[in-house]
Image (cartoon, rainbow, N blue to C red):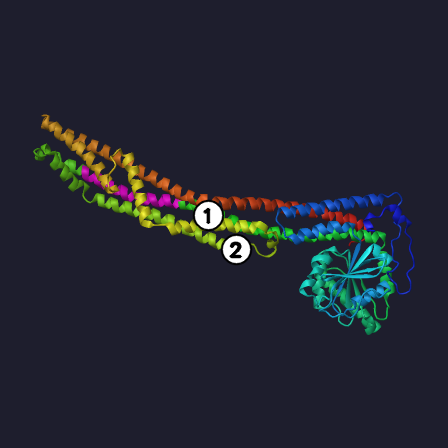
Amino acid sequence: MPILSQSVEARGREVVRKPARGAYLANCTSVPLPTASGVLDQATRALVRDERLVLGRIRELLVAQGATADAIEQLRQAELDLDEPFLLVIVGEFNAGKSAFINALMGDSILREGVTPTTAVITRVRYAPTTIERREGHILEVGFPLELLRDVAIVDTPGTNAILREHEEITSHFVPRADLVLFVTSADRPFTETERAFMQRIREWGKKVVVVLNKVDLLSEDQVGEQVEFVRSGVERLLGFRPQVFPVSARTRSGFSTLEDFVRTTLDERGRLALKLSSPLGVAERVGRTFVMAAEEKLAVLSADMQLVESIDRQLTNYREDMRRDFAFRLQELENIINEMMVRGLDYLDSTLRFARVIDLFRQKVLQQEFERVVVGDAPERIDRVAHDLIDWMVDQDLRLWRSVTEQVDQRRGAGVEGPAQRLAGSFEYDRRALLGSLGQTARGVLQRHNHEREAVQLAASVRDAVTQATLLEAGAVGLGAVTMALVGGAAADVTGLFAASVLAGIGLWVLPRKRSQAKAQFRARTEELRGRLLTALKDEFQRELERSIQRIRDALAPYARFVRGERERTESFIESLRAELARVADLRGQVEHIGGEPI
């Protein structure tokens, strides 16, 4: 019957029986608890309930985070083991005499001795009405009619220096479930390197470890003392605790009395209870700490991912500012050309609208042609050249931006989840890589589809249409230079035409200076107005194109950014919740240690 399912009354009816000669554990049954009213039993039930709850909550947290199945199973098994017999696991190197030690401890030849490392299996000894053996994979189930085995199951493991791949079941299955570990080491070569490594793994599960120094019949009494101290100090240096070490000889069946006393006191009702309740807490602590570390590693990956998102966002902000600044500089060149034309136009009106050229004033077409030659000159070609360079620059900058994003995404995609964080990867790594892949594919698609000439033509047409609409011109002008020429030439035609009409109407030549001033003012106003509309239209179209370019990248980045932010929040919440559960585990451990009377 499982120790935790026994009632207080049943415990009270148990008696202590003296062991037969050599049968050191055969009759080491429970002793009555020193309790009067079942208070301890109520406290025990409360502890068991609280342990089940905390194990369940930790398991739910891990399931929600996509933790590895083995960790979830370890927590589930730890909860189930609360209803199982006390599990005593014997470990040590091959040829340390573990099987012989167990036989001597039990007072009977339950286990075969002298097997080779290649045929060694994990042996689990349980109570059975008659002696039976049953092989299940790499586990040998042994049933034996020993009263102690009703409440204590014993597991004998292969040597730590002869563990085959399949024997990893020791650490992945039995060690986490152990309530007490007896570590058997040989006196002729105690605490070897493999034993040190294995003991360290055992202690990571929070297990109480007792060291048995076997084969002391090979040593003198002084040598036994030296080896006991060697093991104690070695464990203390390595793991930070000073273990109990019991020197015995399984061959001569000597030295067991001290171990018998320890086992009798440790495996009494109170001791078994404390160890049994401590075991699942050790599993919870080990699994919990492992996944806090894994979550922190995952959080580091997400933080780096978030840095990429924020870096690209900052780059887009800087890109906008740089483009606006550079555009203003490039636009100044265009504005200078228009300013120069206006100055030439004013000079032309000054030199043309005079008495000396009064005959020419009647020939408007001649004036118009002369104006285009003197004032407009090569301005349209220069304007087209500046506009072409400006559009090329915008297309090129957009391409550079996408190329930069592509390189950064590809680099980040190569930095996946590694180390402990892989235990929490689940669908996270798949989703993360898929989103990074989608973002990278979008960026690479933009680069592959990029046709500089086509995009420049499209942008030029868009700019031209915007300018013609803003300046109320008829569509059809070929380039920005032609549009500008039409604007400036049209303004001049209006001025010279009106002036010629005034002359033809018979207005006196004495008003010529005044008319010249009016013509210049009108030309200046019209040119300023048209220039303002032209530059405003260019700025507006540039701004629309700039924002469209930035938004395309933000739209491509958005799913990945949302995923990273969401996963980071989930992971931070997971760490906080898991640490809270580990704090509850620590509190429960304190209560369990109070039952046992000493730290486990």
The mark nearer the N terminus, 2 or 1, is 1
| Magenta segment includes 161 | no
- In what element is the residue under mark 1? helix
Residue 237 drawn at (x, y percent) = 72, 63
- In what element is the residue under mark 2? loop
Q: Quadrant of residue 88?
A: bottom right
Q: Nearer the viewer, mark 2 or mark 1?
A: 2
Q: Quadrant of residue 356?
A: top left
| Magenta segment includes 326 | yes
Residue 592 drawn at (x, y percent) = 78, 49
Instruction: Bin the neighbour count of mark 2 within 10 Å (Cα to Cα): few under 14, some 14-19, many 20 and up.
Output: few
Lateral position of residue 221 relative to residue 369, left or right: right
Lateral position of residue 545 relative to residue 343, left or right: right
Query: As shown in the figure, which amino acid type bears the numbered disc 1?
Result: Ile
Residue 432 drawn at (x, y percent) = 53, 50
Q: Residue 415 — which label?
A: 2
Q: Is residue 284 visible?
A: no
Query: As shown in the figure, which amino acid type bears the numbered disc 2?
Result: Ala
> Residues under labels 2 and 1: Cα distance?
17 Å
- Compared with 241, 314 (above or below) is above
Start-end of magenta stretch? 320-345
Q: Look at mark 1 in the image and give the residue it sits on.
A: 312
Compare residues 131 and 420 and report the one nearer the observer. 131
Lateral position of residue 308 relative to residue 160, left or right: left
- Compared with 210, 570 (above or below) is above
**Quadrant position of the C terminus in the picture:** bottom right
